[in-house]
């Protein structure tokens, strides 16, 4: 049972890491630093108070998720109960602002796409708990916009990724 849970967690961690890497790679297309009032048409008035935020492609050092294990646990914790019971999966795309201190600005979390409202709300809750090593421009931490896909997949359906080794001290299953 413990081995299965560790493999499930490893698979969830790998999925979250892959999603973050894919989002970072996708954002590497040419973009420009913008005044935050013009960055996203769906943003609310609280966003206008943010002095300057960069797009991900415009920073010299990209943000790095520091609490990956906690974020993975939160995806599982906030997974809508009825959808988990039915084995439903879903990918939610969230756009959010990472502040200079590496926290997520809770007033600037926008669900861009979700298969349904429940997954969207769960993803927004997860993102608000994420902590990052901040993005940097000229070695100084800066606020940056990030678009991240969040995968909801029932734990029972999670399989270890081939490139994730089993936890140390355990023998692989035959």
Image (cartoon, grey):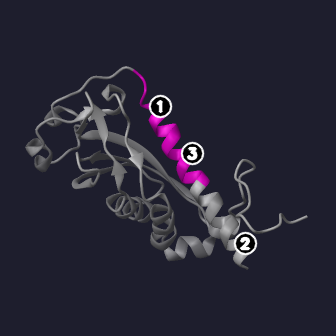
Percent of width and height locating residue 63? 37, 42
Q: Name the residue under label 3.
A: 18
Q: Name the mark nearer the viewer: 2 or 1.
A: 2
Query: Alpha-carbon neighbours of circle 3 within 10 Å: few (<14), some, or many (≥20)?
Result: few
As drawn, the residue found furthest toward the right would be 174
Quadrant where the N terminus lies?
bottom right
Q: Is mark 2 on a helix, strand or loop?
A: helix
Q: What element carries label 1?
A: helix
Q: Mark 1 points at which residue?
A: 26
User: In this rendering, is residue 138 above or below 113?
Assistant: above
* First in residue order: circle 2 vs circle 1: 2
Kindly indicate whether the residue at mark 1 contacts the one at mark 3 (C-beta within 8 angstroms).
Answer: no
Instruction: Identify the image quadrant of residue 174.
Output: bottom right
Percent of width and height locating residue 121? 37, 63
Q: Name the residue under label 2.
A: 4
Kindly indicate whether the residue at mark 3 contacts the one at mark 2 (C-beta within 8 angstroms).
Answer: no
User: In this rendering, is residue 71 above or below 60?
Assistant: below
* First in residue order: circle 2 vs circle 3: 2
Distance between mark 3 and mark 1 Cα atoms: 12 Å
The part of the chain drawn in magenta is 14-29
Distance between mark 2 and mark 3 Cα atoms: 21 Å
Q: Does the magenta stretch include residue 91?
A: no
Give the residue at x 45% y 70%. Answer: 78
Q: Name the mark nearer the viewer: 3 or 1.
A: 3
Nearest the viewer among 80 and 150 is 150
Q: What is the magenta segment's predominant secondary structure?
A: helix
């Amino acid at each position: 049972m413990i081995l299965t849970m560790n493999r499930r967690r490893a698979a969830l961690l790998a999925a979250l890491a892959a999603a973050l890497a894919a989002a970072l790679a996708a954002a590497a297309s040419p973009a420009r630093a913008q005044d935050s009032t013009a960055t996203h048409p769906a943003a609310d008035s609280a966003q206008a108070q943010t002095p300057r935020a960069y797009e991900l492609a415009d920073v010299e050092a990209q943000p790095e998720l520091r609490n990956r294990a906690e974020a993975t646990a939160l995806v599982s914790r906030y997974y809508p109960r009825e959808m988990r019971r039915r084995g439903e999966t879903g990918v939610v795309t969230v756009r959010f602002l990472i502040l200079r201190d590496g926290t997520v600005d809770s007033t600037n979390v926008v669900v861009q796409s979700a298969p349904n409202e429940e997954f969207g709300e769960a993803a927004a809750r997860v993102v608000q708990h994420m902590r990052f090593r901040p993005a940097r421009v000229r070695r100084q931490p800066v606020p940056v916009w990030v678009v991240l896909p969040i995968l909801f997949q029932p734990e029972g359906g999670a399989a270890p990724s081939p490139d994730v080794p089993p936890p140390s001290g355990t023998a692989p299953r035959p």
